[in-house]
Image (cartoon, rainbow, N blue to C red):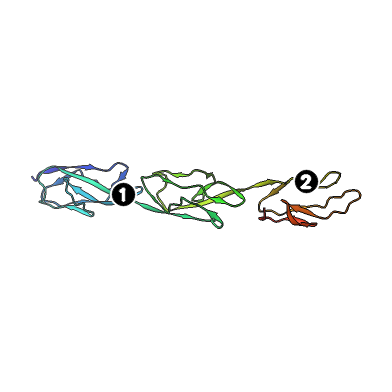
């Protein structure tokens, strides 16, 4: 009766292997399937500590006469990071890849007239600022979409002693035009608004959506 040699597996934490033989019968080939592991590509089996790893491994019928150790080796997958809706946006730290098993830090972008509200990762409903993509959070390509809150600026008035203005707008939201009415003052004709002290004066004032 031919000898049966035990097969020991290493490097299999988190991995899946179908048809996992535990013995090699001398005189009969033993086929070892390639395992799978989330976030990694299988790089081959190292047999009894060999330096070369082999995929699609078959233990030859008469190659081994003792216990066999199979060590799975892996290569971490590298996933693409794509950025969407970035028109007019500045971003200093914008990594374009994420290596599984290592965290990836993404900077906070800036945009004129807006406050950054967070990144939406691959369509998530919740946005996150100061984003770190966790080492094992994603095992696929990643899409980052910035979200924003329009800044709201205070409108203050000068030269209004004795004058009446209704309505008196006190806020200007970036991205939305703001119309400023014409004040009235007994004994005077309105000559216009000076915006932030700049000439000429404008009588029919509309604060442009992105002008301020």
Q: Quadrant of the N terminus?
A: top left
As drawn, the residue found furthest toward the right would be 187
Look at mark 1 in the image and give the residue it sits on: 36
Q: Position of residue 178 (x, y in %)?
A: 73, 52
Asked where in the image residue 66 lies, by quadrant, the reply is top left
Left or right of residue 198: residue 66: left
Confirm or deny contact between disc 1 and disc 2 (CB under 8 A).
no
Left or right of residue 64: residue 201: right
Look at mark 2 in the image and give the residue it sits on: 158
* Residue 19 visible from this viewpoint: no
Left or right of residue 164: residue 170: left
Q: Position of residue 27 (x, y in %)?
A: 10, 50
Q: What's the mark number on residue 59?
A: none
Give the mark count: 2
Q: Front-most of 53 and 101? A: 101
Q: Nearer the viewer, mark 1 or mark 2?
A: 2
Q: Position of residue 155 (x, y in %)?
A: 73, 46
> What secondary structure is found at the residue carrying circle 1?
strand
> What secondary structure is found at the residue carrying circle 2?
loop
Q: Front-most of 128 and 151? A: 151
Of pointers 1 and 2, the one earlier in the residue sequence:
1
Q: Position of residue 70 (x, y in %)?
A: 20, 45
- Label 1 crowding class (10 Å Cα cut-off): few <14, some 14-19, many 20+? some
Q: Front-most of 46 and 178? A: 178
- Label 2 crowding class (10 Å Cα cut-off): few <14, some 14-19, many 20+? few
Q: Image point 43% across, 52% down: which residue?
A: 95
Q: Image point 51% across, 56% down: which residue?
A: 84
Left or right of residue 184: residue 207: left
As drawn, the residue found furthest toward the left would be 1
* Residue 90 visible from this viewpoint: yes
């Amino acid at each position: 009766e031919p000898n049966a040699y035990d097969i020991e597996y290493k490097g299999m934490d988190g991995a899946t292997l179908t048809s996992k033989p535990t013995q090699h019968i001398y005189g009969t080939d033993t086929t070892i399937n390639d395992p799978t592991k989330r976030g990694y590509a299988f790089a081959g089996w190292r047999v009894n500590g060999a330096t070369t790893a082999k995929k699609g491994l078959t233990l030859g019928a008469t190659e081994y006469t003792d216990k066999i150790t199979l060590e799975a080796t892996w290569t971490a997958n590298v996933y693409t990071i794509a950025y969407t809706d970035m028109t007019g946006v500045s971003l200093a730290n914008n990594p374009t890849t994420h290596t599984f098993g290592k965290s990836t830090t993404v900077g906070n972008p800036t945009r004129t007239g807006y406050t950054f509200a967070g990144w939406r990762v691959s369509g998530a409903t919740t946005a996150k600022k100061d984003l770190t993509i966790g080492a094992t959070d994603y095992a696929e390509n990643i899409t980052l979409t910035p979200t924003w809150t329009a800044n709201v600026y205070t409108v203050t008035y000068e030269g209004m002693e004795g004058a009446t203005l209704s309505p008196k707008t006190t806020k200007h939201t970036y991205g939305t035009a703001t119309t400023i009415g014409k004040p009235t003052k007994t004994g005077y004709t309105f000559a216009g608004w000076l915006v932030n002290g700049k000439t000429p004066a404008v009588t029919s004032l509309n604060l442009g959506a992105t002008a301020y």
